């Protein structure tokens, strides 16, 4: 069983969030530190700590997160212009909450690489 996270508290309505989408499998809410004009987190209601913990049994759940992203892109009107979805894994990957989640960013042109490395080589 996974440890309780801020995301499980949002799912259970123990703490507030600006929810933009919900169904029986997923929840999407605005990021509190947005990096784009539209920045939401799309999370499964089933807690999975990291990408490394995804199993074959989670395939439909993880796939559903992308279905939600496509639905939100169409509803928000930026599907054709484009958007970015990112899932971080563990500390070096930038994961800060250990409950998998897609960052969905839109509303501006995205560059590559997305940011500078924290550590110079």
Image (tube, rainbow, N blue to C red):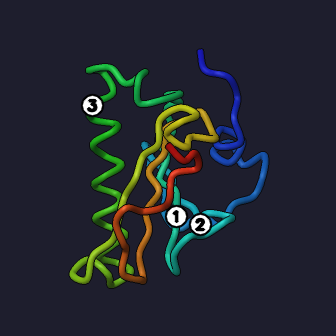
Is 54 positioned to the left or the right of 95 in the image?
left
Q: Which residue is mark 2?
A: 30
For label 1, the residue is 40
Q: Earlier in the sequence, mark 2 or mark 1?
A: 2
Report the quarter where the N terminus lies.
top right
Q: Which mark is on residue 59?
A: 3
Lower sequence index among marks 1 and 3: 1
Circles 2, 3 touching at the beta carbon (< 8 Å): no
Q: Count residues near mark 3 (Cα–Cα under 10 Å), then give few for <14, some for 14-19, many for 20+.
A: few
- The residue lying furthest to the top in this view is 1
In the rendered image, the vertical position of residue 60 relative to residue 7, given as above or below: above
Q: Secondary structure at mark 3?
A: helix
Toward the viewer: 104 or 42?
A: 104
Q: Residue at x 37, y 61 (%)?
A: 113
Q: Look at the numbered discs 2 and 1 and tell me whether their residues touch, using CB distance below 8 Å.
A: yes
Query: How many discs appear?
Result: 3
Q: Residue at x 53, y 32 (%)?
A: 90
**Other-residue count near label 1 (Cα within 10 Å), few / some / many at <14 / 14–19 / ≥20:** many
Q: Nearer the viewer, residue 98 or 47?
A: 98
Percent from the top left, x then y, of residue 80?
Answer: 21, 81
């Amino acid at each position: 069983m996974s440890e309780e996270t801020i995301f499980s508290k949002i799912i259970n309505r123990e703490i507030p969030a600006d929810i933009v989408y919900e169904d029986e499998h997923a929840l999407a809410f605005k990021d509190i530190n947005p990096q784009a004009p539209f920045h939401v987190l799309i999370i499964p209601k089933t807690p999975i700590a990291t990408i490394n913990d995804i199993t074959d049994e989670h395939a439909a759940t993880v796939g559903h997160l992308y279905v939600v992203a496509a639905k939100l892109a169409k509803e928000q009107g930026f599907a054709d212009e484009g958007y970015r979805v990112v899932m971080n894994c563990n500390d070096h990957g930038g994961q800060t909450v250990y409950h998998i989640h897609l960052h969905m960013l839109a509303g501006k042109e995205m560059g590559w690489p997305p940011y500078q490395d924290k550590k110079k080589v």
